[in-house]
Amino acid sequence: MSPAVGKRLGPYELIAPIGAGGMGTVYQARDTRLNRQVAVKVSSEQFSERFGREALAVAALNHPHICTLYDVGPNYLVMEYVEGREIKGPLAVEPALRLAVQLADALDAAHTKGIIHRDLKPANVLVTKSGVKVLDFGLAKVVTPAVSSTEETITDHITQEGSIVGTLHYMSPEQLRGEPADARSDIFSFGLVIYELLTGRRAFDAENSASLIAAILTADPPPLRSLQPVVPAALERVLHRCLAKDPEERWQSARDLRAELDWISGSSGAAAAAAIEPSPRHKALASRRLAWGLAAVSMVAAAIAVTAYVRKTPPVYPMARLNLLPHDEGAVFISDPSMGGLAISPDGKMLAYITEAKAVSTLYVTSLDSGEPRALYTGSCGKPFWSPDGRSLAFYSPAGLLRVDLAGGAPQTLVSAVARGGTWNRNGVILFPFGSTQRNRRIHRISAGGGTPIPVTALDTSLGEDAHYWPQFLPDGKHFLYLGRREAPAKSAIYVTSLDDPGHRVKLIETEYRAVYAPPACGGSDGWLLYVQGSTVVARPFNTRDMSLHGNPVTLVPNVERVGSDAYVDISVSDNGILAYNPSVEPIWHLSWRDRKGARIGSIGGPGLFGSWRISPDGASVAVARLDPVTTLRDVFLFDAGHGAARRFSFAGNSDSPVWSPDGKWIAWADDDFGILRKKALGGGEEVLLPGRAGFELNSWSPDGRSLLYEVHTNETLSDIWELPLESTEGRPGKPHPLFQSTLDEMDGQVSPNGKWIGYAAQDAAAESTPDIFIRPSHATGEKWQISTDGGATPRWRGDSRELFYYRAGKIMAVSIEEAERGSISIGVPKELFQLPTATSFDVTRDGQRFLVSEQEGSGPRPLGVLLHWQDSLR
């Protein structure tokens, strides 16, 4: 919420709002200490410490054509108050050149200090009585200066490197591709500003963002002198070089650019203007030539139009590919077979996606016009899909299928179901998979306002079908696609059927994965069916009139990321044909051994998709929940801790969170279909300890072997930690009861080996806080001690209960625990053992000397891809 006029931010009294944008609101204000007018830009979020450091670096700029930054508050910037007007054209050559020289000089001063503006546009350049003033370094990037300097160099970034920042009309090609921006990116934006200053029109403009991006990436603006004949040829050459697509072909520094503009200004003033001013005779001749030229252009245009009409071939644009990286530091995009996902809005203007940072998932929507992200939901979530009008999103969470409106308000639970995929038509019907287990789900329908699910499809058990997934409505809102999964994955297939007659279906292709319908390009009659074939995303013409495929598959995205022998891709296509995709459903992970200093000392198994894992009490084996990349089901495997040989331990297909009994003879695990199960580690026998329900997650086995701690996800109390007694007087499991039940999310309860304490993670989800680590007595007394204050997850005890380890923001932390008098404990200061930025979880041997961690293959976040005009390339 913006502060009210008349209020104070520190010593600054707000007088009146003077502007607003995606980064905040700007107010005219008074510095009550110095009694001077200032401009205060207020953000809706608190600035990070890094932002403050870099803002102060920008404040070091002292140049007559750069607005001075005076001060930085917790969520506001205080700047010089500048009276002037936004730089606008068309302007005569001489004054435009004068302003261009000043602007280039300002950029040179900033670049010399290692500061890249990244959002240079007319709105950020004011013309005052003393010349131009460059404003708003809110998106600036601070890098090591390109020239030698005795001042301290700065290498941090105010925004995540690789993310798209800026204003679309004035962004360089490399910024649109999500590549690093440098001084040459500002030079491209400079060329756009001066082009507009001379002509009064933007160099690149289009009806929608997709066409605009394609134009900036692939097209040239109209020649400058075709719009302003009096512009010197030398100036046109300068701007043409500013607007080169390849940064290597542009001016390499603002200093060289300013020198060239100085030369043009000095040599081409009135004399140059006179030299290009045509004589009366030449005017008449030029007029006749112009008339003939316009007539010729008109005839050519008419001929092209007639030819296009006769041949019915619309113009073909080259395919453009953009890469988008997460805007949050340390975040990665999530897209796995059960959660994650991305969805582009029907109009192609917004992209919904899910990121994970510091073990916390967040659903975002981002405008592809401005790149401004907005968080809609924080917590475990997945598989978003849009309403037809683009005003709402539906997505899955442990609570079920939720709906959230972009206009605001809390998410609404439509139905308690967690599954894969959903689709929404213009009549307010939502289709989604629903069933009591993952092996009997079929497509159901509900109203977009919620209600009781009504079955639509029926499983064909004679074919071995065990589930229907991934529905997608076709344009008529009645027919829809879905994946019919079979017990033999190679026989799974994509079908098309309709709401009117769901018993009649047509088999399109055999595939183990989902398929996506894409509408036809402008002028086309057939849409496309997109699916994975081998390690390639292919497109095949699809006729929605008779629901038939024809022609051969055409490669669209080659060399999809592989996990083992299997390929994945997550695809979404807008109604106007913009395609977004995540080439790997989940990063490739390895389980590796590390010592207390973080040195790698071995690994087990090969690459895979892992749930959770636990080391046996003797350290010889590891129980690992591992995802089958074909069936997308998860089972428990036993790995030899030394050479990594593995054998499948569970076969239910929906297993996770294994834990060992204290003597190492038993393994228990959770299964969404069956509940909590127990089985001898050597194999043989199996029993259900607690009947099945979704949301179980086993935490630990008590040291005396008499109970299990598990986590329950509920709507009322979020995550609670419960205890299940293993034996009652009748020889059966006792009645489960809650140990921790509050308004907090309480997770990962781990009983200390001496049986006296429980370490766990807890967070206030309502306040959107990060989890922290706590300790309580094993028998609830109301006491608790907070271990971490800056975040933590996955507590693990050393075998003697005198040290507790946990994971925090890419670091493995350790804290000493000593028993004190009268049942209290003495807690040491948490210390960092080693850094592991790509880890998600870990376990530790009983002696506390070896850590088994998951590590992401490669480094850095994997980008999302956006394709424009891809259908033209397939014609």
Image (tube, rainbow, N blue to C red):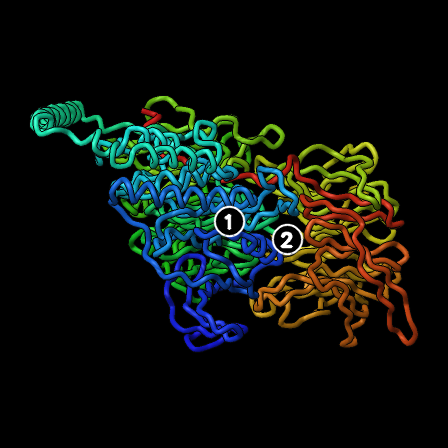
Q: Position of residue 681 (x, y in %)?
A: 80, 44
Q: Please rate how many residues cluster around mark 2, counting C-alpha atoms within 10 Å: few if below 14, some from 14 to 19, many from 20.
A: many
Q: Position of residue 435 (x, y in %)?
A: 50, 52
Q: How many tags in the picture?
A: 2
Of residue 349 and residue 511, the one placed in the foreground of this image is 349
Of residue 633 and residue 323, the one placed in the foreground of this image is 323
Q: Position of residue 799 (x, y in %)?
A: 88, 54
Earlier-in-chain disc, 2 versus 1: 1
Where does the C terminus fall, quadrant-wise? top left
Where does the N terminus fall, quadrant-wise? bottom left
Reading the image, the residue beneath label 2 is 359
Q: Quadrant of residue 704?
A: bottom right
Q: Position of residue 506 (x, y in %)?
A: 35, 34
Name which residue lies at 34% across and 58% down. 84
Query: For the residue marked with disc 2, what is the amino acid?
Result: Ala
Residue at disc 1, secondary structure = loop
Of residue 313 and residue 832, the one placed in the foreground of this image is 832
For discs 2 and 1, the disc positioned in front in the rendered view: 1
Q: Is residue 230 visible?
A: yes
Q: Is residue 508 visible?
A: no
Of residue 233 and residue 374, the one placed in the foreground of this image is 233
Reading the image, the residue beneath label 1 is 140
Q: Quadrant of residue 272?
A: top left
Q: Looking at the image, is 297 positioned above or below residue 839? A: above
Query: For the residue marked with disc 1, what is the amino acid?
Result: Ala
Residue at disc 2, secondary structure = loop
Q: CA distance from mark 2 to mark 1?
A: 28 Å
Name which residue lies at 77% across and 35% down. 603
